[in-house]
Image: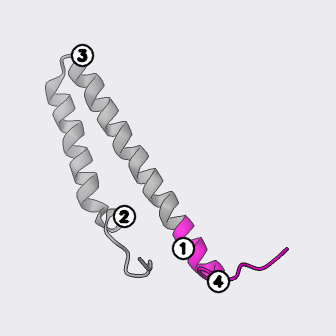
Amino acid sequence: MPKPSSPRGSAKEVAELVAELEQAEAYEQRLRQLIAEARDQLAAGNASVALSLLNAALSDIDSAADVVAVSPTVPR
């Protein structure tokens, strides 16, 4: 198997990026689930429950700033 002419990073860096991507994907899924639940509650006429779910989504966003912020270890 030929080696790449210019390696883009060590195996450790690649593993860190993969882990970060998986974490971001899980985060996205949690937010999508909360939004879908809020939509369903609104459709059922439960505005207060929907508002509570959306507040939970906002709280999740606030507490996960490290997921959505640029990581200093990731070269851009």
Magenta segment? 1-18
Q: Residue under label 3, please give it.
A: 44
Alpha-carbon span between mark 2 and mark 3? 32 Å
Q: Which mark is residue 6?
A: 4
Dot 1 amino acid type = Glu
First of labels 1, 3 by sequence position? 1
Q: Earlier in the sequence, mark 1 or mark 4?
A: 4
Q: Residue at x 62, y 83 (%)?
A: 10
- Between discs 1 and 2, the one toward the N terminus: 1
**In the rendering, which numbered label is found on residue 16?**
1
Mark toward the start of the polypeptide (3 vs 4): 4
Where residue 23 sits: x, y (%)?
47, 59
User: What is the residue that sits farthest to the front in this orientation?
Assistant: 5
- Residue 39's mark? none
Mark number displayed over residue 67: 2
Quadrant assignment for the C terminus: bottom left
- Mark closest to the chain's N terminus, 2 or 3: 3
Q: Nearer the viewer, mark 1 or mark 4?
A: 4
- Classify 1 as above or below 28: below
Residue 31 position in % (x across, y down) = 34, 45
Mark 1 vs mark 3: in front? 1
